[in-house]
Amino acid sequence: MTQSPRADDQAPGPAAGSRVEIIGLAWPEVRAEDDLAALLLASLPPAGLLDGDIVAITSKVVSKAEGRLLGGDRRDAVAKETVRVVARRGDSVIAETRHGWVMAAAGVDASNTELGTALLLPTDPDDSARRLREAVLERAGRNVGVVITDTAGRAWRNGQVDVAVGCAGVPAMIDLSGTTDPYGNVLVVTAPATADEVASAADLVKGKTSARPAAILRGLDMVVLAPGEHGRGARELVRPSELDLFGLGTREAAVAAALRDDPVALAHFPPTGPVGDPPFAGVTSEDPHVRISVRPSTQPGGWTAEIELYGGAAPHAWLHAGRLWERFLVLAAAHRLQVDTDPDALPAPTPRHGWHSVVRIHASVA
């Protein structure tokens, strides 16, 4: 597998430039089968295109040209494009698309299109970017980068920005790990998402209601790849499920842990491995007739939790013990631990005097 471009493998990144110019381009309404390259070249300013320019174009016009406009109920379109629901609150859905993007309404957009219709994302935005780039090189003789953009919300922050859903001739991100900062610190996980930064910058002049669906960014030629080298595309920016610490909504994570029957959802929990802190930490009994104990088991990374009742416990104590048992199982699932119960410690039919164990749970690395 090829790796992301590294800072020491190529010219300096965008920060090396001292000036960037962004030029918005006005287009007529785009229809199915329109020639995007022709529309782009017809909308250029007097200076035209220069080698090293980056063309940023909204996914909406790409989708229109590729016939991705649907009529009917928008909810049906969202369901069609959804691979997995990440979170749902009423009619609002955050979903993973076939491309791997996690977006509101699976990227289905009902803005800047006729009433009663909705736009799906391009089928393969990276391929769309490559074809547009090649057409510009063939017709205008200019080597440019192409970034296809779409609007996305962000975890932890209000508002939206434009991000790259497709790109060609521009590295989606530049891996700076292993390089040093001006103070001599070694960078470990620094990887600027260059294509996303281009997309957000371009939207400052494209806007949402300006009839300017495209923009030229000039002054970033140091990141534009040579003709015929398209890069890995924006798909490189998709975070693998096993590395996504926020791959589920809060409610959906709780449901997945409680049901323990959705391997796709459970894959978003921490990878299997030694557990440093007790997975059952924080669980306490609120009933004086029920007590719990948690201790490391003989297996590395494993834990044993035991629930005990005192004397002839009343029904409410048994119910509380059952709730604690379920909490243990949910927490074990959230830590992706394998759970076994001790068959010799199942509830006894007749409570005995003093404390007695009603269930013992062994949780260990699978």
Image (spheres, rainbow, N blue to C red):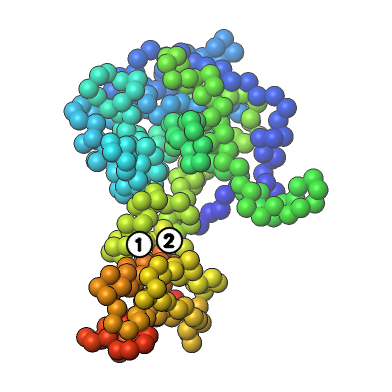
SS state under label 2: loop
Q: Nearer the viewer, residue 274 or 313?
A: 313
46 to the left or right of 265:
right
Residue type at the position of mark 1? Ala
What residue is rendered at 29% in x and 78% in y?
Answer: 313
- Res 259 quadrant in image: bottom left
- Res 120 quadrant in image: top left
C-beta proximity under 8 Å, tags 1 and 2: yes
Is there any visible trace of residue 6 in the rendered image?
Answer: no
Q: Quickly name the residue at label 2.
A: 269
Residue type at the position of mark 2? Phe
Residue 303, image x and y in percent? 46, 79
362 to the left or right of 218:
left
Name the outermost residue toward the right: 183
SS state under label 1: helix
Q: Quickly name the residue at label 1.
A: 257
